[in-house]
Amino acid sequence: MPDITVLHGNQRCTHAFTGTPLLHELLRSLGYAVPTPCGGKGVCGKCAVMAQGALDPPPAHGRCLACVTRVLGDAEITLPREEELRNIALAGALPLFEAHPMPGRYGLAVDIGTTTLAAQLIDLAHARVLASASQRNPQREVSDNVIGRIEAALAGQGAQLQQLVKDAIAKLTQEAATASQIDPNQVDAWVVTGNTTMLYLLTGRDPETLSHAPFEPDWTADETVEGMYLPPCIGAFIGADTVCAILSTRLMHHEGTALLADIGTNGEVALWHGGTLYCCATAAGPAFEGGGIRDGVGSIAGAVDRVWVEDGMLRYTTIADETPVGICGSGLVDAAAALLETGQLDETGAMDNDEESIAPGVALTGQDIRKLQLAKGAIAAGIRTLCKTVGIGMEQVDAFYVAGGFGAHLDMDNAAKIGLIPRALVQKAVSVGNAALAGAMMMLLRQEFIEEARNIACKAQVVTLSGSAAFSDAFVDS
């Protein structure tokens, strides 16, 4: 029987196996986490590992892609060190309100993002935050996007996806409780928000209705499942996270016209105008969170997070001031804006060279720029199409709220330079951090906000961008 030896950190373990399994499937069966953000298509490169031995195809330069490599016999694999995420956006300041908390002593608010999970532990009796916790969404092992996870669930991986996220919530509960020096069993109230797909997967529901037109969900949450209250969703691609963000920003209480954009793997846009709430969703993809970018990484120590031009040269900073290991979303936007400024990148996205160095060992390629163009084009087109549908110009927007982990670290001026947000909105932009998590916290602290969330979901008018000529035109222009 052949053996596979796995080196991970300071550990070296040897395991016997049978057959000729795909490397990533074998490693997962042995308890190792292997990211396959592209769904195992062999295109993102994020599952690359150092390898040697009986592998097909043979390793190139000592590396192979775990998702497409079969283990034919004895082999040795070195897994990369798992990095801790930094700079994960948590809830910003909450609006003032009188507390009327859910029953219980301690409550946990959780936001299940496509890329990360974030949680805050609250002392309900005294209405104060005790601790915060965050981690990568472990479902990224299966796919880095909503569509990929829906497809995986339909292919029989629903139970796996459900268990991954339930284990993650349990881990966040333990971490926050330990930091607060309380027993995790004393946490007896939860509000868990997320997009519609994330809540389907959490509850083990069949996402079949989310997978095809007319994209009408057969369940929109607004119920308590296994002790967790799940806020209402608006539609298939506008979930409880958007409802919570609208709630926490008090968007529908604005006297003028207010716009909210949650910029991430999935982009949601909400517009409050003339007493009516309009919403749309657009798929930006994982580029803003480092996905699909050759040297892209999440917000880990050593990620290039700021880039600017000084004396004609590119300058940069990294998270935790460590040696550069890659570039995260905020750095990607800054780098593109800086290359435009130096002329190394033109307005069409063409570069002078095949790649441009940003920092030692970190560069942007033409393909990276193309993926950034697609991502920023989707967000910009969503904003413009929603406003055009309602019949207003950007100058009529009085307030612009930018939500999400990526948005919390975004340089608005550079975002406008590359066309991610309209120039007219830069001076009106306010970063509100994880507004979805803030909304979940508000429901824990005042039960009446649950009814307000229901009202938001009920009154929202969804603007469908699929098949929209206005969206297509705006996307091309962006």
Image (cartoon, rainbow, N blue to C red):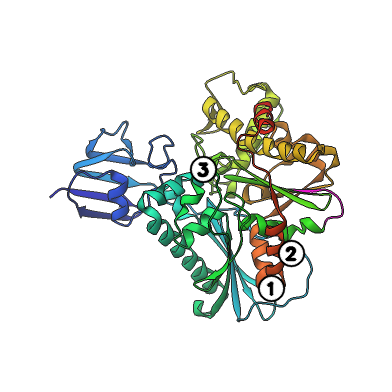
Mark 2–mark 1 CB contact (< 8 Å): yes
Relative height, residue 445 to residue 50 (above, below) = below
Q: Which residue is mark 1?
A: 445
Helix, strand, or loop for circle 2?
A: loop
Distance from disc 3 to disc 1, alpha carbons, whole Å, reads: 35 Å
Is 139 on the left or on the right of 281, as rendered?
left
Please state the horizontal and vertical placement of residue 230, each as a whole percent of the image. Answer: 58, 65
Q: Look at the image and give the residue range highlighted in magenta.
A: 254-259
Q: In the image, what residue occupies the spot 64% across and 65% down?
A: 440
Decide which of tag 3 and tag 1 comes sooner along the chain: 3
Amino acid beneath label 1: Leu
Decide which of tag 2 and tag 1 comes sooner along the chain: 2
Is 467 on the left or on the right of 169, as rendered?
right
Q: Nearer the viewer, residue 318 or 37?
A: 37
Distance from disc 2 to disc 1, alpha carbons, whole Å, reads: 11 Å
Q: In the image, what residue occupies the spot 59% across and 47% down?
A: 319
Is 258 on the left or on the right of 323, as rendered?
right
How many residues crowd mark 1 within 10 Å: few (<14), some (14–19), many (20+)? many
Answer whether residue 10 is magenta in the image: no
Q: In the image, what residue occupies the spot 51% across and 43% down?
A: 297
* Label placed on residue 297: 3
Quadrant where the C terminus sits is: top right
Please state the horizontal and vertical placement of residue 399, each as a whole percent of the image. Answer: 81, 48
Amino acid beneath label 2: Leu
Please state the horizontal and vertical placement of residue 449, each as a whole percent of the image. Answer: 71, 69
* Label placed on residue 94: 2
Nearest-to-viewer mark from 2 and 1: 1
Please state the horizontal and vertical placement of residue 252, each as a whole percent of the image. Answer: 78, 57
